[in-house]
């Protein structure tokens, strides 16, 4: 029984990851592409959220707030100095 389940899982993975054969229905290809795009989108969003959390943690706890304030002061001074 266990061997049968593993074999069915491997067949499903192969079917979902294998390139579409010539003459395949475009609906099958679109479904696979749509799922892949959703997965990629989710991974990008998770990565962006992780980076945002790291930046927030640095800015609030690591003395980053003072550095950010200094950066804004320099930028504003530079802009005002050119006017």
Image (cartoon, rainbow, N blue to C red):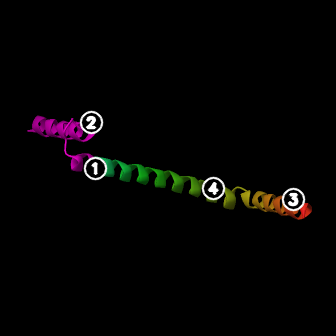
Which of the pair 37/25 is nearer the observer? 25
Establish if 3 lies above or below 53. Answer: above
Give yes or no for contact between labels 1 and 2 (Cβ–Cβ under 8 Å): no
Q: Residue 33: image x %, image y %?
A: 32, 47
Q: Residue 15: image x %, image y %?
A: 21, 39
Can you tell which mark lies on residue 78? 3
Badge 4 element: helix
Q: Nearer the viewer, mark 2 or mark 3?
A: 2
Question: Which residue is under mark 1?
Answer: 30
Badge 3 element: helix
Q: Residues within 10 Å of mark 4 (few under 14, many from 20)?
A: few
Q: Earlier in the sequence, mark 4 or mark 1?
A: 1
Question: Which residue is under mark 2?
Answer: 19
Question: Which residue is under mark 4?
Answer: 55
Badge 1 element: helix
Establish if 37 lies above or below 12. Answer: below
Q: Earlier in the sequence, mark 2 or mark 3?
A: 2
Residue 72 shown in magenta: no
Q: Earlier in the sequence, mark 1 or mark 3?
A: 1
Among the 4 quarters of the image, the one containing residue 3: top left
Q: Residue 57: image x %, image y %?
A: 63, 58
Left or right: residue 1 compared with residue 71: left
Give the residues drawn in magenta, as a range: 1-29
Q: Residues within 10 Å of mark 1 (few under 14, many from 20)?
A: few
């Amino acid at each position: 029984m266990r061997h049968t389940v593993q074999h069915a899982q491997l067949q499903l993975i192969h079917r979902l990851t294998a390139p579409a054969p010539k003459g395949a229905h475009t609906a099958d290809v679109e479904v696979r592409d749509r799922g892949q795009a959703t997965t990629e989108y989710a991974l990008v969003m998770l990565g962006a959220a992780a980076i945002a959390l790291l930046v927030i943690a640095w800015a609030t706890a690591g003395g980053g707030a003072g550095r950010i304030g200094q950066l804004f002061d320099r930028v504003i001074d530079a802009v005002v100095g050119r006017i």
